Amino acid sequence: MNQQLLRAKMRQHMADEKYDLAIEDFHRYAEHSSIEQVDEETAALASEAITKRQLRPVPHVQVASPMRRKRNALPVVFVSTLVAGGALFAMRSSQSVHPLAQPHAAIVTETAPTEVASTAAASLDSCLSKSDSLYQSANYQESKVQALQALQLAKTANNRRGIATAYAFLGRNEHSLGRLQAARDAYVLSLDIYKQDGIELSTAFTQEILGGLDVQLGNLKEAEQELQQSLATRTKHADGPGIIECQRDLADLAEKQGELQKAEQYLVTARAGASREYKPDMEAAIDGQMGELQVKMGNRGEARRLLQSSLTYWRTNKHPHWIAATEMKLSRLEMAEGNRAESASLAADALSYFTRLGDAQGIAAATALSK
């Protein structure tokens, strides 16, 4: 279906007040298209459908605390804060998984003195703010729509930092939807702008996210280079939470390379850093990561203790993605110990969360374990 026909179909649904159908049509098209193929008019129409649907609220999965980044099929989050004179997008996480309490980069939309430019900047800020809000509510498809519209607005205004931010927002949504290569493509486009413009901390932040994703994709040589570069910059700036994030990714990398003791040491160091930073979300995430590693190292008793502690924390904080992720880890442990019924039960519960969140990668993994 070309975009002209898509828009006609969406407009008909909207005329009939069937906003969900209009949004679903857009999502189906976007799922099989590259970022560059969705034009401004189509993205704007999808945004209009979302806005009109929100006038008639529908239940959404609520996230108790913001998340930044996807690890083991989980989300990436950038927290945005509006400030006078433009929008300041602090790429950080206080999150429920890998929280970074400090802002890592200020990406300020450039405002021109003309009324037209000011209106365009306000529209860009609004789209990015809506995208961020929807992402934090785990509405990844709708967040993606807003990010696509923001990208078109930023390109029209030739706003390089706005373009970089929009690509970063698109990357995190693709990541959360299990489209890892599409996420990587978006992050690379964002990173290129930060490098060219010499925005050091934004470069380091995006290198770390990209490095973690490359570990997942098996691009281990690229991952090591990206992570070491990010770690060097963050060490230079005494960015404690950012250093911890790099250590966690380097632990994943070492595990992929079969160096389990090295991975364990990275996590021990990261856990100590998280305690110093007083980040309970980060501590719980590291416990889950360490628990999974301990299974591979044959320390199943310790693995169970860590994973159950982590799951209790996520359930208390009512974060669906991390409940599901930790249930998956426990499910694999139960399977390894021959407890098939318990393994299947945990995986089935995880599947229900992944299905509600639209996480394709999580759905596939949970379905395989729940049988």
Image (tube, grey):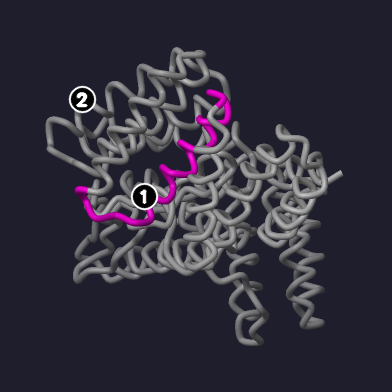
Tell me the residue that label 1 is attached to: 282
* Residue density around tag 1, few if under 14, some if 14–19, many if 20 or more, within 10 Å: many
Is 122 situated above or below 154?
below
Q: In the shown orientation, is residue 318 left or right of residue 59?
A: left
Q: Which residues are magenta?
A: 276-298
Residue 36 vs residue 72, the one in the foreground: 72
Q: Residue at x 51, y 31 (%)?
A: 294
Left or right: where 267 falls relative to 257: left
Task: Label the magenta part by its dominant secondary structure.
Answer: helix
Residue 318 visible in the shown view: yes
Q: Considering the image in quadrants, where does the C terminus appear?
A: top right
Q: Name the residue at the right extreme.
A: 371
Amino acid marked by disc 2:
Ala
Q: Nearer the viewer, mark 2 or mark 1?
A: 1
Q: CA distance from mark 2 to mark 1?
A: 21 Å
Q: Could you tell me which residue is drawn at 39 percent across and 46 percent down?
A: 163
Q: Would you say residue 294 sits in the magenta stretch?
A: yes
Q: Which residue is mark 2?
A: 232
Residue in the picture at 66% in, 87% down: 56
Q: Position of residue 96 (x, y in %)?
A: 42, 57
Residue located at (26% from left, 60% from top): 88
